[in-house]
Amino acid sequence: MAFLHRNKDRLRVVLAVCMVVAGVLHFVVPQPFIRIVPGFLPAPAMLVYLSGAIEVLLGLGLLVPALQQISAWGLVILFVAVYPANLNMAFNHIQISGIPDTWWFHAFRLPFQFVLIAWAYWYTRFEAAQFS
């Protein structure tokens, strides 16, 4: 646990970069993301582009001290909101090139979303030391 606290700022940058990259991928290769949008949601392409833009903005927001908390809360909400797409991919065996469609992959991937939620939540708390 000490490792995590010593590296909290570095891990924030890692999360931010991951979110920006993931968001950009929504625009560069949208089709895999579109394919996993649950059928009950309207306009899958629009949702993919919108979520990609939000990922980029929230990722960048993690890097701005004044926006860090609100961006972290936004990521918590986003990670919860996109979870149905992950479930859709797993339960309906939607195959994406280069991504395994195996029980062990989904057994790791689905719970990992909760790690992402906790990771983002970690940055929702104000710490005076981070702004000095």
Image: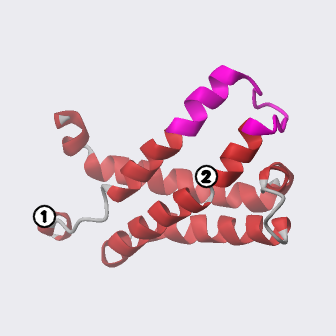
Query: Quadrant of the image for the C terminus?
Result: bottom left
**Element assignment for label 1:** helix
Residue sitting nearer the eye, 92 or 43: 92
Would you identify the image quadrant in which residue 42 lies? bottom right
Residue 111, percent across and down?
A: 51, 37
Q: Which residue is painted at 13% across and 64% down in the image?
A: 129
Q: Which amino acid does label 2 sit on?
A: Tyr
Q: Earlier in the sequence, mark 1 or mark 2?
A: 2
On screen, residue 51 above or below 119: below
Image check: 99 left or right of 81?
A: right
Q: Which colour scheme is used?
A: secondary structure
Q: What residue type is labelled 1?
A: Ala
Q: Which numbered tag is attached to residue 129?
A: 1
Q: Residues within 10 Å of mark 1 (few under 14, many from 20)?
A: few
Q: Which residue is painted at 40% across and 56% down in the image?
A: 120
On screen, residue 7 above or below 108: below
Residue 67, percent across and down?
A: 37, 76
Residue sitting nearer the eye, 6 or 50: 50
On screen, residue 124 above or below 3: below
Q: Which numbered tag is attached to residue 104?
A: none
Q: Which of marks 1 and 2 is in front?
A: 2
Q: Mark 2 points at which residue?
A: 83
Confirm whether the magenta stretch covers residue 110.
Answer: yes
Confirm whether the magenta stretch covers residue 18.
Answer: no
**Element assignment for label 2:** helix
Residue sitting nearer the eye, 103 or 57: 103
Residue 69, percent across and down?
A: 33, 71
Q: Which residue appears farthest toward the bottom when viewing the image?
A: 66
Calculate the distance from the C-alpha at mark 1 to the C-alpha at mark 2. 33 Å
Residue 46, percent across and down?
A: 80, 72
Would you identify the image quadrant in which residue 115 lies? top left
Magenta region: 91-111
